[in-house]
Image: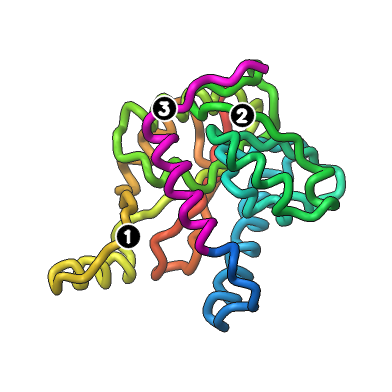
Amino acid sequence: MPAQPPSPIELEFARQHEREHARSCPEKGPGSLARRLGLAREKQWVRQALKLAGEPGLILDLPCGAGRFWPVLAERANRVILAADPSQEMLDHCAVHHSLDVLKRVRTFQSSVFAIGLPENAVDCIFCMQLFQQVSDSQQRMAMLREFHRVSRDTVILSLWIGGKVMDWHRRRQARAGGQQAQRVLFGKALVEGEFRQAGFEIVGHRDFFPGYALRRLYVLRKNH
């Protein structure tokens, strides 16, 4: 299938993701206890969202980056996983980074999130864990959501950061003290949920990473037909 050229925001996302992944690759040890607990919670969090979405059988991971979530997506034996990314270099890296057991469950292709190289209603669910949460422009978010609406026949799982939590207070306090902040977009609940509905989705539900504290939230959306 022909690949659409990646947009500037996708190119920046790919460069950032490649830098972050390059730093993490040399780490052979198990990491700190906090990191191990965080990774375990993240897997549990994704499983909760997949269950809320009805355990979709055909899922598109977009953009997939280094395939961080493939092992969790592949836990269900009858699930078919499509994975796309604007960076062919990242897809090539995935081919040597994962085990053969995982790779045989995944079919990859290069694609822009704004012009997915699949027909209408092609998959049961679109799984977008990393890019949407970095898009500050409302028009770009709406373009993504409309393309997701076209390609998914049922659900979309989206990760983003919601303001108003305890960690948000800590972030603002650090900013006033001159501390560094991660470059993330903090969404207002009413704003982003309004965009979901405007794009033709109803909200099935959401799961917070650490309820009442952490900023990270997974939304499960269902396509209105």
Q: Residue at x 74, y 39 (%)?
A: 81
Q: Residue at x 71, y 56 (%)?
A: 72
Callout 1 crowding tier (Cα within 10 Å): few <14, some 14–19, many ≥20 = few
* Nearer to the camera, 188 or 13: 13
Disc 2 is placed on an element classified as: strand
Disc 1 is placed on an element classified as: loop
Mark 1 near mark 2, Cβ–Cβ under 8 Å?
A: no
| Percent coordinates x, y for residue 60 in the rendering | 66, 36
Instruction: State the CA–CA distance, disc 1 to disc 3.
Output: 22 Å
* Nearer to the camera, 190 or 36: 36
Q: Residue 65: within the magenta? A: no
Mark 2 or mark 3: which comes first in sequence? 3
Disc 3 is placed on an element classified as: loop
The amino acid type found where label 2 is placed reads Gln
Mark 1 or mark 3: which comes first in sequence? 3
What secondary structure prevails in the magenta region? helix
Disc number at residue 182?
1
- Would you place residue 21 above or below residue 79 in this image? below
- Would you place residue 171 above or below residue 6 in this image? below
Disc number at residue 110?
2
Locate residue 52 relative to residue 166 in the image: left or right.
right
